[in-house]
Image (tube, rainbow, N blue to C red):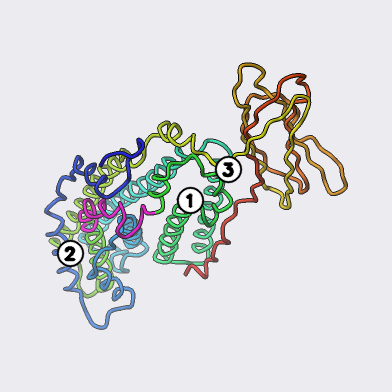
Amino acid sequence: MASTNGLVPITRTFLSSYYDKYPFPPISSDISRLIDDLYNMSKHHLQSPLPEGERLLLQEVESEAPHKMDENMWKNREQIEEIMLLLESSHWPKTLQRQSTPEDVELARVLGQLRDKFECALKVVESFQSKNSNNIFNTVMTYMPQDFRGTLIRQQRERSERNKQAEVDALVNSGGTIRDRYALLWKQQMERRRTLSQLGSATGVYKTLVKYLVGVPQVLLDFIRQINDDHGPMEEQRQRYGPPLYALTKMVLNIRLFLSFSWWRFEDIKMQKNQISILEEAVQVYVSELERFLNFIGEVFASSPFFVTAEEAGALEGIKNGGYSETTVSAGKTHEVSLTVETVNSYIAWDFSVLQGKISTDIGFSVEHTDSSGHKTLMLPYRRYEFDQGNFCTVMAGNYRLLWDNSYSTFFKKALRYKVDCIPPVVEPVPSTAGEAK
């Protein structure tokens, strides 16, 4: 699609032209066969009525995989952990734990190997999710002005992630199951989506930064807002790369179903050698295909040209920055702006420059605090600048005076362009408790 003012609109058509260059090699044909084998073997253990856990698991196996790709990632990770729990010797059927026969000893050895494979697969999924999340956030941040705005957004994200981890820890410590934990993790993932959307529209926790998002290409903000819409740009990604991931989700669910049913009726129907062989093959194919898919999709995501370069964005949009004031500071005079700070940990921020002339382009600048009793404290010592951009976090409420000083000049006035403000602390909603998350 033709560019507009040097910026490429982010659309499904644009992504389609990019994804055309990265076709995913077909997923192994063994997967559909092994899914059928596992499901048919599980049905041999079917008996009515089913325990609640097995009944819900069977319903999930017989349902369609989630449509969203990241939800499938979490689903695979959840099932891997559930399978690893089943493969721990303490969760084996009592008969198998005793290993009273050569067949049981051999099965125990195989189960240990399978658990090792799933442990490696879990690390691959966790690494992929972490890298992908950081890549998206860091890519977006390269388009944000590299000053206090970026600092505030990064600090907010760090606080948010600490709060999310505390929620998970509280749930685990209260006895939450793997299913409970992943329900919370997915809820948190949806919160990250909302936060990213808020950044695109400068609402929610970012509403205090709205006036400072100038200089950011509108096409970037539009993309951030719509990136995860059901019919937005990412729908192209789901249609291209979703099917193989959906098959992997279906496969890992069937592996868990077979193991769960087998443990449930182990005393009545022990695993046959051919069933063990099918299980081994299924695990090997699943782990290898999952790793191949994640390596492929990780490279595609990392290289996706979703945005114009930060340098281009700055060059194109820098002249459009709003919110600045301009004034003339006469020779021998000063210009000041007073800000009232009601809440500590607010940010005092400024950005100014002396408009270029032939000579004498600097001006003095300082910041002073006055408390309720009239006591004055110099917060930023006087210094002469041609331009400056800075901020500090307040530790005291009161009045802050920002002073531009041209009193040292006898003849030359200064054309000053500036923007200042007080930004309240950027906070987010109080996280829900572990009980509510359940």
Q: Quadrant of residue 73?
A: bottom left
Q: Position of residue 356 (x, y in %)?
A: 59, 23
- Residue at image x 67%, y 22%? 362
| Viewer-nearest of discs 2 and 3 | 3
Q: Residues within 10 Å of mark 2 (few under 14, many from 20)?
A: many
Q: Which residues are magenta?
A: 226-247
Q: CA distance from mark 2 to mark 3?
A: 63 Å
Q: Position of residue 347 (x, y in %)?
A: 66, 44
**Numbered label attached to residue 323:** 3
Rendered position, 393 above or below 428: above
Q: Earlier in the sequence, mark 1 or mark 3?
A: 1
**Numbered label attached to residue 199:** 1
Task: Report helix, strand or loop for mark 2.
Answer: helix
Type of the residue with mark 3 = Gly
Q: Earlier in the sequence, mark 2 or mark 1?
A: 2
Type of the residue with mark 1 = Leu
Q: CA distance from mark 2 to mark 1?
A: 45 Å
Rendered position, 327 above or below 78: above
Quickly name the residue at label 2.
38
Q: Nearer the viewer, residue 254 or 223?
A: 223
Q: Earlier in the sequence, mark 2 or mark 3?
A: 2
Q: CA distance from mark 1 to mark 3?
A: 19 Å
Quadrant the N terminus occupies: top left
Direction from residue 327 to residue 263 in the image, left or right: left
- Residue at image x 25%, y 52%? 236
- Residue at image x 58%, y 43%? 323
Q: Quadrant of residue 58?
A: bottom left
Magenta span: chief secondary structure: helix
| Viewer-nearest of discs 2 and 1 | 1
